[in-house]
Amino acid sequence: MPAGCATNPPDGLHFRTVSTGNWNDVAHWQSSLDSLAWESAVSVPDHHSGSITVRNSHTITITTNVSADQLVLKRSIFLHT
C-alpha cells in the first residue's frame, strides 16, 4: 500500500497522534487494541474507532469530512470553522 494511504480501521481500535499533520495521513497516528501497546497505524480513525487522542503540542488538520466520537484533546485546542 502506498505511504499515506489508509484502510478502514477495525471497530474499537484506539488511536493517538504521534506528530502534527493531516487527519487523513496515517503517518501521524498510532493505533492500539488495548490502549497499552501502541504501533504505527495502518489506517486513520473514524466514528467506529475507540478513543481518539490528539496529544499535547500536536495539531491535526482536518482536510476532508470526518465523523468521530470518543475524541480526547490534550491541552489547548483551537477550533476553526
Image (tube, rainbow, N blue to C red):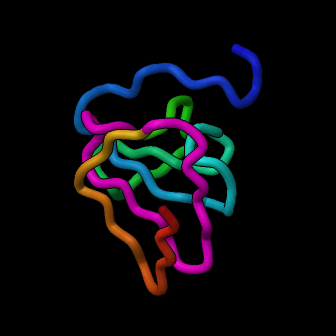
Spot the residue most to the top.
Answer: 1
Question: Taking 1 as reference, is 38 left or right?
Answer: left
Residue 33 covered by magenta stretch: no
Foreground residue among 21 and 15: 21
Q: Position of residue 2 (x, y in %)?
A: 75, 18
Principal SS element in the magenta part? loop
Position of the N terminus, as image quadrant, is top right
Query: Measured along the vertical axis of the image, is residue 76 above or below residue 44?
Result: below
Q: Residue at x 45, y 85 (%)?
A: 75
Spot the residue most to the right.
Answer: 3
- In the figure, residue 3 lies in which quadrant? top right
Question: Taking 52 as reference, is 41 left or right?
Answer: right
Q: Position of residue 24 (x, y in %)?
A: 58, 38
Q: Position of residue 14 (x, y in %)?
A: 34, 47
Q: Residue at x 39, y 45 (%)?
A: 32
Q: Position of residue 30 (x, y in %)?
A: 53, 48
Spot the residue most to the front.
Answer: 81
Foreground residue among 35 and 6: 6
Report the number of numbered marks. 0
Q: Residue at x 40, y 62 (%)?
A: 53
Query: Measured along the vertical axis of the image, is residue 32 above or below residue 10?
Result: below
Q: Residue at x 64, y 39 (%)?
A: 25
Foreground residue among 52 and 13: 52
Question: Taking 25 as reference, is 12 left or right?
Answer: left
Residue 51 covered by magenta stretch: yes
Residues rendered magenta in the picture: 46-65
